[in-house]
Image: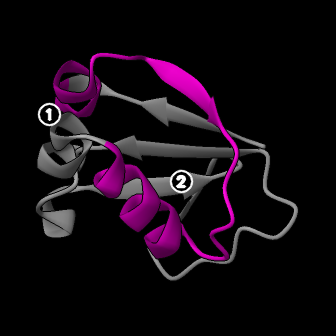
């Protein structure tokens, strides 16, 4: 079980701030594929991965990051300066 957290427009599209997911995925990309296959709202949120960033256990990483032992995955849009 992995806690999946959504921020900003990702949360708006999916309609949840967070959820606990039982997954067989071994990478973040695999998790995204599983979530995208659930419903259109997930597919829409993950349709352009270049518009998303991901953190695994609160560390920025890439979509090929392994999920072994991971407790939390967070998805959010890129940060803008200011």
Q: Secondary structure at mark 2?
A: strand
Other residues around mark 2 within 10 Å, as few (<14) / some (14–19) / many (≥20): some
Q: Is residue 53 left or right of residue 61?
A: left
Which residue appears at 24% of the width and 34% of the height? 10
For the record, the magenta segment spans: 9-38
What is the tally of numbered marks visible in this picture? Answer: 2
User: For this view, does 38 lie left or right of residue 12?
Assistant: right
The answer to whether residue 26 is visible is yes
Asked if 2 appears above or below 36 in the picture, the reply is above
- Please provide percent x and percent y for residue 76: 32, 41
Say if residue 62 shows up in the picture: no
Q: Check the image and report above or below for 8 versus 4.
A: above
> Where on the picture, by quarter, is residue 33?
bottom left
User: Where does label 2 land, which residue?
Assistant: 55
Which residue is depicted at the point 11% across and 46% down? 44
Q: Is residue 65 left or right of residue 54?
A: right
Report the side of 32 relative to 27 (left or right). Answer: left
Location of the C terminus (image quadrant)? top left
- Which residue, given by chain and number where applicable, does mark 1 sit on? 82
User: Residue reaching furthest right?
Assistant: 69
Residue visible at 18% across and 35% down in the picture: 41
In the rendered image, residue 7 lying in the magenta stretch gets the answer no
* Residue 70: percent from left, percent from top: 79, 56
């Amino acid at each position: 079980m992995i806690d999946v957290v959504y921020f900003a427009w990702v949360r708006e599209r999916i309609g949840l701030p967070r959820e606990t997911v039982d997954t067989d995925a071994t990478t973040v990309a695999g998790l995204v594929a599983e979530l995208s296959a659930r419903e259109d709202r997930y597919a829409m949120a993950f349709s352009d991965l270049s518009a998303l960033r991901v953190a695994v256990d609160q560390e920025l990483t890439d979509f090929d990051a392994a999920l072994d032992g991971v407790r939390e995955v967070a998805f959010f849009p890129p940060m803008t300066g200011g």
